[in-house]
Image (spheres, rainbow, N blue to C red):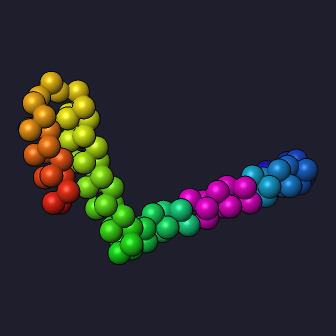
């Protein structure tokens, strides 16, 4: 068994290099995972998410207003409702 150990000596740099690449990849993966969790807990991120949700709702209403064939009074009423939000 120990007679064949010399075969592993030339392979050692490749094995160590592969391990180094793998460990750096795992470290980056862990850092990114922690950053995403911090972003979920950040009050500014929560505020921005709520603002984006509101803007998407407004865009949806504006698209409906633009594509529907409704009377001018109804359109004016819907625009005023958007301003009140």
Visible in this render: residue 59? yes
Residue drawn at x 64%, y 57% as measured from the top left: 25
Q: Quadrant of residue 38?
A: bottom left
Residue 23, compared with residue 58, is above or below; it is below
In the rendered view, does 77 fall on the left or right side of 61? left
Residue drawn at x 23%, y 27% as measured from the top left: 67
Q: Quadrant of the C terminus?
A: bottom left
In the rendered view, does 40 fall on the left or right side of 58? right
Please provide percent x and percent y for residue 35. 49, 67
In the rendered view, does 49 fall on the left or right side of 66? right
Q: Nearer the viewer, residue 34 or 56?
A: 56
In the rendered view, does 77 fall on the left or right side of 31? left
Please provide percent x and percent y for residue 39. 43, 68
The furthest residue to the bottom: 43
Q: Nearer the viewer, residue 58 or 80?
A: 80
The furthest residue to the front: 72
Magenta residues? 19-30
Visible in this render: residue 40? no
């Amino acid at each position: 068994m120990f007679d064949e150990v010399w075969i592993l000596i030339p392979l050692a740099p490749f094995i160590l290099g592969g391990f180094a690449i793998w460990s750096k990849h795992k470290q980056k993966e862990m850092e990114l995972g922690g950053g995403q969790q911090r972003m979920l807990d950040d009050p500014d991120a929560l505020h921005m998410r709520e603002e984006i949700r509101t803007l998407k709702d407004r865009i949806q209403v504006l698209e409906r207003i633009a594509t529907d064939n409704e009377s001018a009074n109804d359109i004016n009423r819907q625009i005023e409702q958007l301003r009140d939000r």
